[in-house]
Image (cartoon, rainbow, N blue to C red):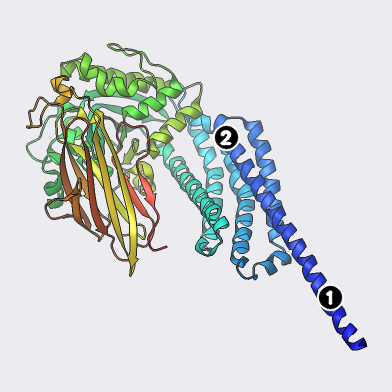
């Protein structure tokens, strides 16, 4: 009996220790959860304070976030947590929580702090009295580079875990953390690139000339819209000025393409891509468009060092920062009416295209002058340009090889991807062939679904919806809006060419229009990417539903990037679709 009691005592002690350890472990898990939730809330407050320019609130939020993140990291870095990561079922989850805690601690210390430092000066990047402070630009490079390095390190650490093995409660938050860090890392990469090339592009080493092309979304082009007013912008030692303005229509057509076209370009977009300034953005590849515009401009005028584009939707965002602008020949332009005035009302007010061109030229000059004069709310101005860039409306190309290499791969570069990557690229781009301004009434959306993954090749389904939101009596609109049936399209209707561009090394098949299979010409090989063109006539209130299937190239197992043309709707239409190989 004495031996039995001797056996029970250590067993009871072990059970007691297990219970105590379990209670302590549960308490630790609860405390870590509390710390992470607090840090997340402080990060939200920090972001709002930075956006609004409230430096004291931002500093206080950062301090709180650092304390909570430090506490979570300390609790998950000890021996108790290490033991818990070996537990069945929840071990992987707790290891993921430890990674998130450590990443958040690093970012709160090494990532957010330099960015808060930069945020205090960011308003200085906005022009003042026609100039940008190049010394300030230079001073911001080091903290942005530190922040970028911290977020890149966070990306690497988070990518070492596969959340597919986590419990449902942790999968979503972990993937959200990865998404947030990825987005911030991309933004910092863009900022780092901008700060690197801004001084030379703004004339720190000598005067530079740029074409500024205003694209008109009322006549849609794959790259944005019909080129309208074209301005020559000079940058010298940070000071920027408008030196020449011409109407894009003044370039007319050339007998031969201004640059040699490839057979694929000729087959997809025909010779107009190279012979007609107004059609050089039929291609969605902005570097190619920039080359064609540069070549045509230099046939008539001086050498240019780069090309920039904006559209009326971006101008409406800028007007939200600058306030209304008075323009002769029309009402004051505001953030609320700019899109309607510039893309529709102007054609109802002026029948003569020369009068329209004069108005657009005056608008371009007025907006440019107001932008260069500066704003009482420079953060909002910078955010407006960032929004336009994110939506694919603002693009920049430099003919300096080093500068363009720095821009490559960024949103603002507007490149069509031709090199195979792990992440497949899909595009559905729109070109008006009505020869009129009916795209003002065009609404569209593009969706892609990754269905399966076999041996590193994904099978995708794509779908595009196009709607003509024109009024029933659209045929009564001015001829310049309807096209006057010059190209055989009924007045009030619009004809749209959609180029479906598949992934590098992929294929497109089974194209359907409103549920019925259609015969399309064989896909054209555009530098390794298949291109199929679908022509559609859209009567008022008619909806087109185009569906197709695709396969990716080999070893393209990543998420699918989907791009389309920016229209008049103030939203980002591009998206990223989860891979079927996950």
> Toward which corner of the image does residue 22 lie, by quadrant?
bottom right
Q: Residue at x 29, y 34 (%)?
A: 567
Numbered label tally? 2
Q: Is residue 264 above or below residue 236?
A: below
Residue drawn at point x = 32 percent, y = 27 percent: 312
Q: Nearer the viewer, residue 569 or 124?
A: 569
Mark closer to the observer (1, 2): 1
**Residue 263 screen position, x and y as percent:** 12, 52
Q: Residue furthest right?
A: 2
The quadrant of the image that shows the C terminus is bottom left
Considering only vertical position in the picture, is 438 above or below 370?
below
Classify mark 1: helix, strand or loop: helix
Q: Where is residue 422 in the image (x, y as percent from the top left)?
A: 36, 60
Give the residue at the far front of this rendering.
1
> The residue tagged with tag 2: helix, strand or loop?
helix
In the figure, residue 370 lies in which quadrant? Answer: top left
CA gap between label 1 and label 2 equals 54 Å
Q: Tell me where residue 443 appears, x and y as whole percent.
A: 28, 34
The residue carrying mark 2 is 48
Disc 1 packing (10 Å; few <14; some 14–19; many ≥20): few
Q: In this view, does 119 lie to the left or right of 406?
A: right
Q: Residue 33 carries which label?
A: none
| Residue picked out by circle 1 | 12
Left or right position of 283 against 208: left
x, y percent for residue 519: 11, 52
- Quadrant of the image containing the N terminus: bottom right
Residue at x 22% of width, y 46% of height: 546
């Amino acid at each position: 009996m004495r031996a039995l009691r001797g056996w029970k005592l250590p067993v009871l002690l072990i059970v007691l220790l297990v219970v105590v350890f379990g209670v302590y472990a549960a308490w630790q898990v609860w405390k870590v959860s509390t710390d992470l939730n607090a840090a997340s809330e402080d990060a939200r407050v920090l972001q709002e304070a930075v956006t609004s320019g409230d430096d004291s609130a931002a500093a206080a939020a950062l301090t709180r976030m650092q304390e909570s993140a430090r506490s979570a990291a300390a609790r998950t870095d000890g021996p108790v947590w290490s033991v818990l990561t070996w537990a069945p079922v929840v071990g992987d989850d707790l290891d993921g929580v430890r990674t998130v805690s450590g990443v958040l601690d690093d970012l709160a210390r090494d990532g957010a702090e330099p960015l808060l430092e930069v945020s205090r000066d960011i308003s200085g990047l906005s022009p003042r009295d026609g100039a940008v402070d190049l010394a300030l630009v230079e001073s911001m490079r080091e903290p942005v580079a530190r922040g970028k390095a911290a977020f890149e390190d966070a990306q690497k650490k988070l990518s070492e875990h596969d959340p597919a093995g986590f419990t449902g409660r942790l999968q979503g938050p972990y993937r959200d953390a990865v998404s947030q860090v990825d987005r911030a890392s991309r933004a910092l990469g863009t900022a780092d690139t901008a700060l690197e090339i801004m001084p030379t592009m703004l004339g720190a080493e000598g005067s530079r000339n740029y074409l500024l092309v205003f694209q008109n979304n009322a006549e849609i082009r794959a790259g944005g819209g019909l080129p309208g007013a074209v301005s020559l912008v000079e940058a010298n030692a940070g000071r920027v000025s408008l030196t020449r303005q011409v109407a894009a229509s003044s370039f007319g057509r050339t007998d031969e393409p201004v640059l040699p076209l490839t057979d694929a370009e000729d087959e997809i977009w025909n010779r107009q891509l190279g012979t007609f300034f107004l059609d050089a953005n039929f291609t969605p590849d902005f570097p190619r468009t920039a080359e064609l515009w540069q070549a045509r401009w230099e046939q008539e005028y001086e050498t240019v060092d780069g090309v920039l584009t904006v559209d009326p939707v971006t101008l409406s965002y800028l007007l939200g920062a600058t306030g209304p602008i008075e323009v002769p020949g029309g009402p004051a332009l505001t953030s609320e009416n700019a899109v309607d005035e510039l893309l529709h009302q102007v054609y109802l007010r002026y029948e003569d295209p020369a009068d329209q061109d004069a108005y657009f030229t005056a608008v371009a000059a007025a907006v440019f002058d107001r932008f260069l004069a500066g704003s009482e709310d420079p953060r909002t101005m910078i955010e407006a340009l960032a929004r336009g860039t994110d939506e694919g409306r603002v693009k920049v190309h430099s003919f300096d090889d080093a500068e363009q290499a720095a821009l490559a791969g960024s949103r603002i570069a507007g490149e069509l991807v031709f090199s195979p990557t792990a992440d497949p690229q899909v595009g559905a781009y729109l070109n008006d062939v009505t020869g009129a301004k009916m795209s003002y009434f065009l609404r569209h959306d593009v969706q892609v679904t990754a269905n399966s993954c076999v041996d590193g090749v994904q099978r995708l389904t794509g779908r595009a919806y196009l709607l003509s939101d024109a009024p029933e009596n659209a045929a009564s609109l001015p001829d310049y809006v309807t096209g006057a049936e010059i190209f055989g399209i009924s007045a009030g209707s619009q004809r749209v060419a959609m180029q479906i561009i598949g992934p590098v090394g992929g294929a497109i098949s089974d194209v359907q229009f409103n549920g019925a299979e259609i015969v399309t010409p064989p896909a054209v090989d555009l530098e390794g990417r298949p291109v199929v063109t679908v022509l559609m006539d859209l009567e008022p209130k008619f909806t087109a539903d185009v569906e197709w299937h695709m396969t990716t190239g080999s070893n393209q197992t990543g998420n699918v990037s989907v791009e389309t043309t920016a229209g008049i709707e103030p939203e980002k239409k591009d998206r990223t679709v989860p891979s079927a190989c996950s």
